[in-house]
Image (spheres, rainbow, N blue to C red):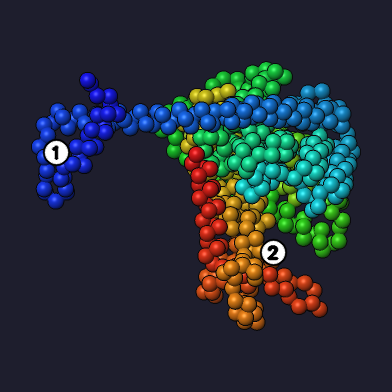
Amino acid sequence: MAKTPRRAAKAACGLLSAQSLTYQGRIGPVGKMDMAKRAGLRRDFRTVGLVTQAETGWKRLKGEMPRQITLWFIALAVGIAAGIAALVFRKSIAWLQHVVYGAEDVHLLHTFVGTLPWQVVLITPIIGGLVVGLLLHWFTPDGRVRSVADVIEGAALHEGRVETRAGLASALASLITLGTGGSTGREGPVVHMAGLIAAWALRWMRADPQTGRDLLGCAVAAAVSASFNAPIAGALFALEVVLRHFAIHAFAPIVIASVAGAVINRLEFGGGAEFLLNDSSALQFYEELPAFLMLGAVCGVVAGLLMLAFFMAEDVAGHLQKRLHIPRWLRPMGAGAMLGAIAIWFPHIIGVGYETTSRALLGQITLREAVLLAATKGVATAITYGGRMGGGVFSPSLMVGALTGLAFGIIATAVFPDMSGTPRLYALAGLGGVAAAVLGAPISTTLIVFELTGDWQTALAVMVTVSISTAIGSRIVDRSFFLTQLERRDIHLAAGPQSYLLALFISQDVMRAPDHDNAAPEDRCWELIEQGTYLSDSSTLAAALPAFERTGQPFLPVLRLTDANSPPELLGALFHVDALRVYNKALAATAAEEHS
């Protein structure tokens, strides 16, 4: 009777165990097997391994498939909801701009605003800033607009959840900003609105942290996809920027949600690209590639200066507000007055700037205009950001990048006419170069450039420019605009989970109480307290671990500090080994999620 592969493997195992086979030159009877028999045994072992893997995979599939299918349907629902929210937000901006400025076609807003009386152009952003300031004063604890950075923080530190009250106020404030003359983009509020939708779904589901982060990624992907008609870039943006990993388990639901968002967009606007180019701008000669390396360096510097200008504006505005005792609700109004004054002469700064960006991609702007408009847009966006008026930085980055690339292209094609293609190609590459460096997202930005323009023939030029610009921009700031924003708030995500996970654990939650079986001796705790070696009840492991390294103590007492007239209360002691154990488990769980 022929043996099955499993029986053959068992027989082989029995044969091997019965023989003496060592690694020190003593080969027993097994070593004398003929080659055919040994090859057969190897085949039997491989067959058994495959059968075992198939059985294990089938069991896992049966156990996890219902949950996965459920998650996919929820991802689809979240994607549809986020897509509709992004569409409503976009249409609302157009409606408000029509009401405020009277523009019939928002894609020609800048041209239309240039024909309005200067009083209208000046007063409109001031009124918008006042409304924004009051909204943020009433509904946010700090008067700050929530945006992409807060969604990244929610994914990393808050199990995929974002603030609801402040988030809704921020979305409305950003809508008013963009509709009344603010110089930002719509992707920031759209991404945070998507985070709100995911948070509502999570509360309904009572989901675990991993599912929470996955659904947050789904909502963000759908919102970006619906906002820009870019399903590929939307999915990768969620993975690259928000979740900051490419785990397999998150890919399918995020793609489903992103496609749903794209369908929502195309049902309303059709399948066309956001920016329509007259013809292809394909690379003419491979000798032209060094020019795009140089353009990447220029874009990286421009992006770095742009981000530094944003942060400088925030610092200067905060300093002036504090020194002059200006109420925080007047801060956006002051920024609106400055924007209105600039818009009288440069109406292109208003809104997301699609008209100017399109003209740059079509090569319809002169060198002098390109440089002047790029500088003015950068200043206006910095004022809007410093004034806390709301909006995102992606669309302004696209506009500044297209103008920078066009200016570079005009010069390059004039100096080397025989080796250069059209300046429009440089504008397209510059558009991606500056935006990628600002977002810190070279992959998704490269793809979104192709999806926004429908021009897939420029891959080499755009990829070269984006790679160099991102490398340079990430050295000027801490990885990206969003991560630097968080770093300025003492939220250290740029260094990775080994840094920010420590802030998730409070010493009081990890310590051993005095009634613990292996509690620290109370006398020794008070000795350490008298020496000034202790932790407060609100301190995290981010403060505790350096204290252990500095003092060399096996444990540190944890105190509750009340007012000056009351003695401190000893709550317990945090042991070094306990802190390391909790930290190690958190790192292992994060690694397991990111590689699952």
Circle on res. 30: 1
Q: CA distance from mark 1 to mark 2?
A: 66 Å
Please tell me which residue is depicted at 59% across the width and 70% down the height of the picture.
519
Question: In this view of the protein, which residue sits in the foreground, 529 or 197?
Answer: 529
Answer with the quarter of the image where residue 411 lies.
Answer: top right
**Element carrying mark 2:** loop
- Inspect the image, locate mark 1, and give the three-letter code of the amino acid beneath it: Val
According to the picture, the residue beneath numbered tag 2 turns out to be: 538
Where 227 sits versus 341, above or below? above
Where 507 sits versus 165, above or below? below
Residue 109 falls left or right of residue 2? right
User: Residue 278, percent across and down?
Assistant: 60, 20
Answer with the quarter of the image where residue 571 lies.
Answer: bottom right
Please tell me which residue is depicted at 61% across the width and 22% down the height of the picture.
277
**Mark 1 surroundings within 10 Å by alpha-carbon count, few (fewer than 14), some (14 through 19), many (20 or more):** some
- Inspect the image, locate mark 2, and give the three-letter code of the amino acid beneath it: Ser
Answer yes or no: is residue 475 visible: no
Question: In this view of the protein, which residue sits in the foreground, 163 or 540?
Answer: 540
**Mark nearer the viewer, 1 or 2:** 1
Residue 136 falls left or right of residue 278? right
User: Residue 261, percent across and down?
Assistant: 66, 26
- Quick check: marks 1 and 2 in contact, CB under 8 Å? no
* Outermost residue toward the front in this view: 1
User: Residue 71, percent across and down?
Assistant: 61, 30
